[in-house]
Amino acid sequence: MRMRNKPWAMDFLKTNDDLVDTDSAYALKIGDFFNTAQPLHIEVGTGMGTFITELARRNPHINYAGIELDKNILIRVVEKVRALDLKNVKLLLLDANMLESYFKPQEVERVYLNFSDPWPKHRHEKRRLTYHTFLSQYRNILSENGELHFKTDNRRLFEYSLVSLNQFGMTFHEVNLNLHENEPEDNIRTEYEGKFSAKGNLIYWLKASF
């Protein structure tokens, strides 16, 4: 997702430094960023923030870190967190390639990947968030019983991800090829999910661990 560039975006994020880490000030010490020590879940690619804010609202006993590289998008997430007065959400202006530099080994209990960019061209395979270099990072930062949750409407990306995770030796706990057919009560629809589902696209979902 790309938004029109806002020249004031970085200034806005920096004035909200109690909520947003723009320069990795809390790398390897994210626990200091939260008011309360609680289990940590992360979403890699926040979109407009509907998913992570609703998840945090439902689960105040869990801390959530939203990771986003686009500062313009992150503005919208900040606004949602403020509007809901959520104390268990922090936002990181961070490249997903830097996860191991930011989080300690086994510090994270769950990783969410929602409607990630499919990067359909073969030459861009390394950018897919289920490519083996990213899986290696998730494995290193996830706790012993940590989980990876992945959701997309892109069938090719889902098929690719199934193969990639399998080759990496991951264990599949659930694989759903039509999530909305009997939609679980705890499913939180992202902005993309609502849009694509309305067009008749199937929603694919899996839960796996290392």
Image (cartoon, rainbow, N blue to C red):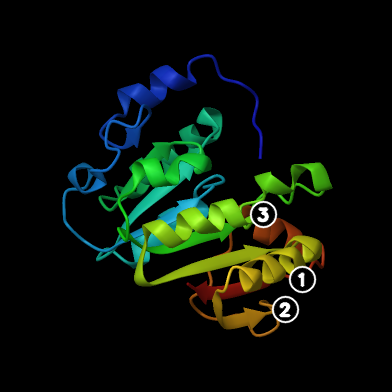
Residue 155 at x, y percent in the picture:
79, 66
Q: Which mark is residue 202?
A: 1
Residue 27 rendering spot, x and y as whole percentages? 30, 38
Where is residue 81 drawn, in percent x and y?
Answer: 37, 45
Q: Secondary structure at mark 3?
A: helix
- Marks 2/1: CA distance? 7 Å
- Pointer 2 with pointer 1, Cβ within 8 A: yes
Q: Which residue is mark 3?
A: 192
Q: Amino acid at mark 3?
A: Tyr
The residue to which callout 2 is attached is: 177
Q: Quadrant of residue 143?
A: bottom left
Mark 1: secondary structure:
loop
Q: Is residue 128 above or below residue 112?
A: above
Q: Is residue 162 left or right of residue 140?
A: right
Mark 1: which amino acid? Leu
Q: Tell me if mark 3 has few (under 14), some (14-19) or many (20+) residues whose alpha carbon lies within 10 angstroms of its own.
A: some
